[in-house]
Amino acid sequence: MTTTTNPDLASESAAPVRGQRWLVSLRALLRNPAHTAGLIIFILFLLIAIFGPMLAPYGVNEQIVEDARQAPSAAHWFGTDRLGRDVFSRVLLGARDIFSLAGLGTLVAVLVGTSLGLLSGYRGGLFDELLMRFFDSLLSLPALLLALLLLGTLGPSRQSVLLVIIVVYIPIVARVVRSVVLSVKTRGYIEAARVQGESSARILFREILPAVLPALAVEAALRFSYAIFLASSLGFLGVGVQPPSPDWGLMVKEARDNVSQTPWALWFPAGAISILVIAVNLLADGLKTLFRVED
Amino acid sequence: MTTHSIFGRALNTALPAILLLGLVLSACGGAAPAEGTLRVAFQPLVQTDPATISSDTEVFVANAVYDYLVDVDPDSNVVPRLATEWDINDDGLTYTFPLAEGVSFHDGSALTAEDVVWTFDRLRDPDNGYPTADLYANITGIEATGELEVTFTLDQTNPFFLYDLSDNHALVMSSDTEDPSDFNGTGPFVVESYSPEDRILLTANDDYFVDGQPQLATVEVIFFSDENAMVDALRGGQVDLVMRMSTPLFESLQGVDGITTYNIPTGGFDLVRLRADREPGNDPRVIQAMKLATDRAAILELVQQGYGAVGNDSPIGPIFDAYHDDGVQAPERDVEAARALLAEAGYEDGLDLTIHVPNSGGRPDLAAVLQDQWADAGINLEISVEPEEVYYGENGWLEVDLGITGWGARPYPQLYLDTMLVSGAVWNESHFSDEEFDALAALAGSTLDDQERIDAYSQIQQLLAERGPVIIPYHFPQFAAIRDGFTGFQLEAFAGRTDVHTIGTE
Amino acid sequence: MAVPLLQLKDLSVAYRSRRGALRAVRDLSLEIAKGQTYGLVGESGSGKTTLALAVLNYLGKDGYIESGQVLFEGADMAALDEAGLRALWQGGMAHVPQNPFTALNPSMRIGEQVAEAIALNSEIDAPEIETRVLDLLAQVRLPDPARVARAYPHEISGGQQQRVIIAIALGRQPSLLVLDEPTTALDVTTEAVVLDLLRELVRDRDTAALYVSHNLGVVAGLTDRVAVLYASELVEDAPTKELYRQPLHPYTRGLLDSVPRLGQRKDVKPLQGIEGQIPSLTDLPSGCLFAPRCPLAIDQCWEERPPLDHPTPDRRVRCHRWPEILAGEVDAGRDAVEPIQVEDYQPETILTVEQLDVQYPIQRSLADVLAGEPARYVQVVDQLDLRIRSRETLGVVGESGSGKSSLARALIGLVAAEGGEVELLGVQLPARLDARSTETLAHLQMVFQNPEEALNPYLTIAESLRRPLRNLRGMSYAEAQAMVPQLLESVRLPAEYARRLPGQLSGGEKQRVAIARAFATHPDLLLADEPVSALDVSVQANILNLLAELQNEHDTAMLFIAHDIAVVGYLADRIAVMYLGQLMQQGPAEIIFDPPYHPYTEALLSAVPPPDPFVKQEHIRLSGEVPSAADPPSGCPFHTRCPRFLGDICVEQEPPWRETQDGKAIYCHIPIEELQAAQSPVLRFNGEGD
């Protein structure tokens, strides 16, 4: 028994006015140093993704023959790779790549997964049963394995990786959304809405969707971090984005062959992946605490 | 019958040297007992039937266990092995080979001309389905014209026939062979034990017919599936010899105490080619602009880290000492000239192309470097990196406009011309069709006059550098590293053909 | 005077929170003598639970004693080390929480859990413990103690679980029982049994008890003294009978006036709820904490915090005006509430329900389905007939599991009835809500039980109110928006609430919005399913009155469902009593409290704890539990528990409906005359009061 259920304090829960809610949320998020760090790093990477092309001192594929395979220096902060390309510039430019790939993939997966989850959870019945069994079968495979299977048929390309992220994460998002829908749809206000003559579409998108959003925000953040990881893994395995794209995973893969010569060309993209994944995970954790989303 | 020198200066210098070596060795007491062990790191062995071998390991082991009728030395000259010499009649259609005396198989049976006949009949019979069937299609007959003499008859002249006889698969086997994987050769080493996935142990053949060979008592070929592990084993002293490795690994062995490294250019190369039969490549100015936009030295430095050799857009590379013309140079990089040519060809606003690249070797890197270099001249490349099975699958590589293809080493340059560049050739990926070229190639491939051939090859090199549909920016290097204490190591461009029987201990 | 068992001295308890310390109990002093039963009443937010937890030294990581002392048997609890505290929890005090299920370990057998409590503070050997366990389980009136001892918590009912908790508490042989709403989660008839048990135990064992409750009825019947808490302060403390006879604090008076007595009716003596709501602990008024809601507040009350006075040596009250109240010069009772007029209802029937069947399928495992097991159903409403006349309020009373909520849900169409016909205004209604016309939806509306769930927390109040207007009355957005202030005003809420989200409203306010929403379509029939059961008593009264007023205003008929027979009696014109999906009795509300009764009604009336210590109540207790609706008894559904069980006829035959001359109908094999002769009124008032 804990005091959090103390009825004496029941009326004391914070109830901010609409509009201030985001501000309050942000303040609550910033209370935890780890979450704050996650947010700051995420924003930093986001800025890099947006302004990277302006900041990068060299072109993505610009080769400086005389500077090839140089250790980090003032001229090349992260050194140069085997082809004389500036690793710092490539890491900066890769940020946009990974954000657009993982971000877009996550976005589409979240949109489609949410719609399917809403529909499946609300309608129930055979549709729900079949869809969920299908998703279960997809989820029974590890994400990477499923991705490799799909890429085996699609062939490696940026579009394929995008599709893979979408296909791999739709079932997960749909499941999360569905579980929230199942818990919400028996709520009094949904029944009340039906009694007030609301259409199913409006019940789904106006009455149920807002309740799904907190869990969805957390899930989207988590999916984003896993998508970064998945895209990088596929790049690393050589079945994802193809050279000479500055995909971080691909950079790690390419640098691995030359690790004895140019270890820095491996450290920096690998570090960028880890830092971004950790940051997004911290952020997801923060959102989870913030929205009090249960696991 | 006259003993015919086919390769002019090459043979003139090489043959006496070898004969001299034999004399020196026999003078030193001939059968000095073999001693010492060489441990070689290689990929695991898969095929053991000489007719089907292909990897370096397979060829390396076969070359130690069996003998070729004739061999090719590191300078691409044909040298005797089981055949002591050869005689070619005047029409160039009949080859007669006397065989060395006192040669016996590891099972004790003596080598006879019948064994050679059996071996080549097996390799050339189309029903057997071996890759050599095409190679030997122009042989009309093989006969044992004596106990120790074999005569080959051809239906047309083939100045490279001796090279064909030295094909990797052409290892002489006993005509009594029941199991082609039984390692019953006449070669310098006998298979002592073979454990797949682990190692194969070879011991010196004490009855080997060449005096003074082999010098080593045992050779252990230890299997590795990973290059890094091989190099680590070399550093750690678990193996003595590593051949074929990536450039970064080779770089990492430079200056390591107790290890000597070797690198040589090979005949192999990466080929950038543009289809010449349709837009934009049907306008020769486009490929010329590409040539002008290319900085070959920078490419060699970036993609091959300076190893190998700069290419001049012709497959007749420096390894073909007899035919390579040092005077032929691909054009120097001149971006402005390239732009001007493109503008003349109607691409003043730039040319957008997709370059198809198999995802292997340095080819993606080459594409990346070209993308950067060509962009200066207004050629904008979209790079499509494809798995090899996609790139080569369903002959897609023959269809695309712009592609990069890797070509391995060949024993003589005519093979490249005939399969890659003459009109209608089976792998004419550039769809090149040039009457002058075709005539020169036909002449070089049939004349028995060495000088005529040398001249034709020189003109071909000039022609390709100027208007050939291909860019050959570099020839691959071959790498090897050996621990100190061994002598007589001579790296071959095809690492598997490196002779182990000439290696000894200090 | 001997040392009191428990003594609280100027106790202040606070919680650490994001917004600083929240003082939930302030400057509270209290003494409980050995064997004394002390009631602690107040609404949510009054601090009563915190006080109970402080006594148990069980405040959790954020709670702490800010000042003052808790002395148990003269020893300061704050000074106790861990071992001392454990000893205290083991032997000195025992806690009976509100929710029994969370207090039991779900993975241990009941017997083990009771044995553990016994073993903690007595050195007896195993066989003896086993005897004691069975003893204790028998003492708390658990049927078949041996079976219960072997059971896991989930295998027994909520009432039985609560009795197990009490057995565990008793196993520790405590000198003080701290009971926190121990019967709130239970049905009335079960509650009565548990309360009997507690009463008996306290009396026989000389155990003292601190009984925390919001239920004035329970406290009236059980305690010796009562302390009333309001917004963290003790406002009144008196012997129970004196407190109920003459409350000196206007808040106490308000609480008592908010609760309907059995037989109290809206048209005769309307309830007088307390206006406003309990202040937030972070924003307390500077003067008397109750002043903003007090009908007697004068300037002094706003400015100066009243001291805790002793009007008599035995009583304490914190009010500036107690002398005037004691002398009868002022009356805290509100005159503002007019009796609610009941117009003679029209004879025409607007709702006819015939042979209504509602079933829920029992989930079958896949294995069962494959094995061809037939689908099984829980029959929650069984062949029910019902009529509601225009403008009439039909009250349906029943315990949980009686099917009363399912009846409402089937009528509104949220669950599809399996059989039977429902006709509203001459139109036969499709079973499913989705199949019903817009007109039907507008004619038939519903107010749900839980105000916390009635409104979508993500939609503004205005949006929630606009929806029925737009969907069911075809209004444009602008028209609907223009109606919002009017709707809010109709439920006495300020217009600026339109922009708020439900999270910014109190429970009562949310229920008002829900009511406004239900009336927005001018329904002919309103279904109200326990609309006040989740609300504090002071709020309940206002909501009940509001419902009645709006009903009059809109000429709406109402099906009012509640478990509290007093509440139903207050509001309804006719009352139907439901048991296991069937009606047991129906008739005019005025005569439900008079014999003859259906034996179930009789037991129900006897079980309700009247909020009045002077009422004499017949003692009738039902044995056993409500049978499962998956396997309902044959014949009369009540026969398994009926105190007036006749014999085979009750088991074998469905009883007939028997009618009295004044319109009461009883579903029983016993003839009306015999019932009349055998039954005396369950409740007798001692002349005073009403």
Image: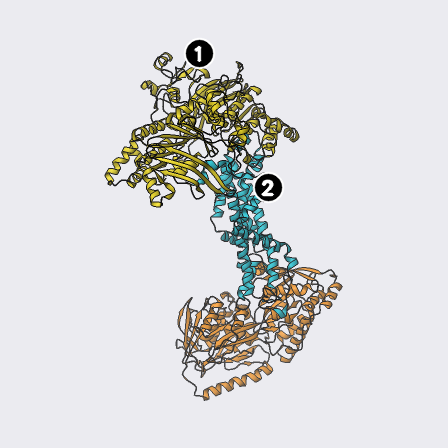
Chain colours: A cyan, B orange, C yellow
For residue B173, side relative to residue C627 (left or right): right
Identify which residue, B387 or B446, lies in the foreground: B387
Q: As shown in the figure, which amino acid type bears the numbered disc 2?
A: Gln
Disc number placed over residue C662 in the picture, else none = 1
Identify which residue, B254 or B199, lies in the foreground: B254
Label 1 near label 2: C-beta < 8 Å?
no
For residue C205, side relative to residue A223 (left or right): left
Task: Identify the residue under disc 2.
Answer: A20
Disc number placed over residue B291 in the picture, else none = none
Q: Residue furthest right?
A: B344
Residue C616's x, y, as percent? 37, 19
Asked which quadrant contains residue B153, the reply is: bottom right
Residue A53's x, y, as percent? 65, 58
* Mark pair 2, 1: CA separation: 61 Å
Disc 2: CA contacts within 10 A as few (<14), some (14-19) or many (>=20):
few
Q: As shown in the figure, which amino acid type bears the numbered disc 1?
A: Asp
